[in-house]
Amino acid sequence: MLTFTTRKKATFILFIVLLCNTLSFSQEIEWQNTIGGSGDDDLRCIQQTNDGGFIIGGLSDSDISGDKTENCIGSCDYWMIKTDAAGNIQWQNTIGGNNLDWLNSI
């Protein structure tokens, strides 16, 4: 599991660098994407899934805007995103209550 925190106003920055699956260790960017809404969105954790995509977890106070399709429920909620192997969003979910909800790991 790769875990890191980056706070960025108005953007849920997702910059994923995948290494080639060869032994040459050549470092090539396979894809990169910026995902976010209009508020503060914070990437907390990411894991590759069995289908080659990624499950991405973080927190957000953005309402529907940009890539975000659900309003914030409280002051800050979990934001889960599933991408395919090319980085396209397959689904997302905002989870939370009326107060602060902090996702730390998947």
Image: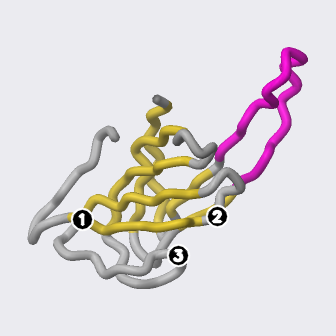
Which residue does the numbered mark 2 point to in the structure image?
88
Q: Which residue is at the front of the view, 104 or 52?
A: 52
Q: Which residue is at the front of the view, 35 or 95?
A: 95
Q: Where does the image place residue 14, in percent across and percent down from the top left?
A: 59, 53
Q: Earlier in the sequence, mark 1 or mark 2?
A: 2
Tag 2 secondary structure? loop
Horizontally, is 3 left or right of 52 in the view?
left
- Which residue does the image show at 37% across and 53% down from the upper left? 58
Q: Where does the image place residue 60, in percent across and percent down from the top left?
A: 34, 64
The quadrant in which residue 70 appears is bottom left
Crowdedness of circle 1 by 10 Å Cα count: few (<14), some, many (20+)?
Answer: some
Which residue does the numbered mark 1 point to in the structure image?
95
Mark identifier at residue 16: none
- Which residue does the image show at 18% across and 57% down from the upper left? 101
Whole-number angstrom distance, CA of label 1 to CA of label 2: 21 Å
Whole-number angstrom distance, CA of label 3 to CA of label 1: 16 Å
Which residue does the numbered mark 3 point to in the structure image?
67
Looking at the image, residue 101 lies above or below residue 91: above
Q: Earlier in the sequence, mark 3 or mark 2?
A: 3
Q: Amino acid at mark 2?
A: Asn
